[in-house]
Amino acid sequence: MNEASAPRRRGPLIVVVVVVAVLATAGVAIVPAFVQGAARRERRLALTPDKEVESLRLPTFALTTQDGAPFTGDDFIGRVSIVDFVFTSCTFVCPTLTQKMLQLQHELADTDVRLVSVSVDPQRDTPERLREHAARVGADTRRWTFLSGPWDEVVRLSEEGLRLGLAPDPNPENVIYLDDGTTMQNIAHTARFTLIGPDGAVLGLYNGLDAADIERLATRARIASETR
């Protein structure tokens, strides 16, 4: 090999090295943009209502928090919220639902997702009783709100707005024994959790008794609450 041919062979090699360097530099810029784009798309999907709830809308309602403050549909605006229906005297499904809410409180502690539990027994669940209940179960009331109010308002939210059943339990054997020695008939209500978007839209319904569904809810709520 003569010396004159060496530069000609190094020339293509230099070009290849330059091209690889340019592509590598471009890749450094492209990868974060791709990741950010994927995250935005994921959030859009999380904020898109599921088909089964596309027709659902939060109705006009007025309830009261455990601290005696008014709470309406407008209070859902600006934050992602998870809603369930319970009552403090319940010995059937409610304790399990409350445990799932506690799980969500823990798993979503580093987000601004709000938890809302609506009492279906306004006759007994006064704000004071709800406040005592919240303390007893370990609820962080800065992030977890308990609501009560007139029966008609609770029905309006549960049945008319979210299409979730609510009525006295028809089974006469489902009796609850109260602390004062009296009894009450169980109240049949949903075991579903409702995910509400920051614009007040109903995003999805999740089975509060299904561990896998609760995990899906936690994941979606986290993504939906992130700002981009």
Image (spheres, helix red, strand yellow):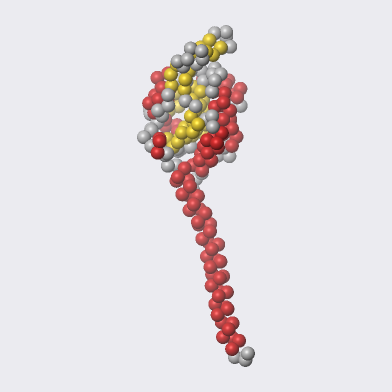
Q: Name the residue: 59% across, 82% down.
A: 10
Q: Name the residue: 55% across, 62% down.
A: 28
The quadrant the N terminus occupies is bottom right
Q: Is residue 88 visible?
A: no
On the image, which quarter does residue 108 sit in?
A: top right
Q: Name the residue: 55% across, 36% down.
A: 212
Badge count: 0
Relative to 104, does residue 6 appear above or below in the rendering? Answer: below
Position in image of residue 126 (x %, y %): 51, 17
Position in image of residue 74 (x %, y %): 42, 32
Relative to 137, does residue 19 appear above or below in the rendering? Answer: below
Position in image of residue 73 (x %, y %): 42, 30
Q: Nearer the viewer, residue 53 or 154?
A: 53
On the image, which quarter does residue 52 sit in?
A: top left
Q: Residue furthest top?
A: 181
Q: Is residue 164 visible?
A: yes
Position in image of residue 67 (x %, y %): 52, 23
Q: Residue furthest left?
A: 55
Q: Name the residue: 56% across, 82% down.
A: 11
